[in-house]
Image: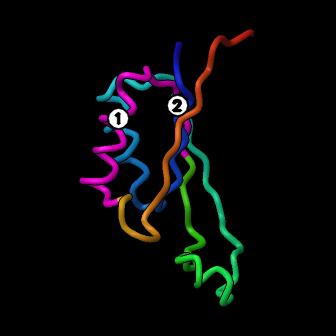
Amino acid sequence: MHQLLTIIGKRKLKNEIIQDLFKEGCAIINSTYGRSYMSDTNFFVSLGFSPDPEKIIITCLVSPTHVPKIYELLNTKYEFNKKNTGIAFACNINHINI
């Protein structure tokens, strides 16, 4: 079984993150540019968000055993554990039909 890992972060980190994912054994790494249209309203600010429109969205397939190590890498090297730096999550994939 594999997991689909999704990472949303700052565009300027795209190449570094993709290189690190490749080193960790991720497969089918895909990236696309994203743009946030979130306004700087009190609602979003109260939740701890601030607008940062320039994003990169990266998806890849990864073994479930590698996910904790990738999360640790994102938290330490790219400071994803701090506000407005990025987010990552993984979803189980039982099988893929082509």
Position of the C terminus, as image quadrant, is: top right
Give coordinates of residue 86: x percent, y percent.
Answer: 46, 59
- In the image, residue 76 sits, relative to residue 46, either above or below, namely above
How many marks do you count on the picture?
Answer: 2
- Depth check: 40 or 59 in front? 40
Q: Which residues are magenta?
A: 58-79
Which residue in the rendered view is the most extreme toward the bottom? 42
On whether residue 77 falls in the magenta region, the answer is yes
Judged from the image, the secondary structure of the residue bearing numbered disc 1 is helix
Q: Looking at the picture, which amino acid does disc 1 mark?
A: Pro
> Which color scheme does this rendered protein use?
rainbow
Give coordinates of residue 68: x percent, y percent.
Answer: 35, 35
Residue appearing at x 68%, y 13% in the figure: 96
Q: Which residue is mark 2?
A: 60
Q: Looking at the picture, which amino acid does disc 2 mark?
A: Cys
Q: Which residue is mark 1?
A: 68
Within 10 Å of disc 1 (Cα), the crowding (few <14, some 14-19, many 20+) is: few
3D distance between C-alphas at marks 2 and 1: 15 Å
Judged from the image, the secondary structure of the residue bearing numbered disc 2 is strand
* First in sequence: mark 2 vs mark 1: 2
- In the image, residue 94 sits, relative to residue 4, either above or below, namely above
Give coordinates of residue 89: x percent, y percent.
Answer: 52, 43
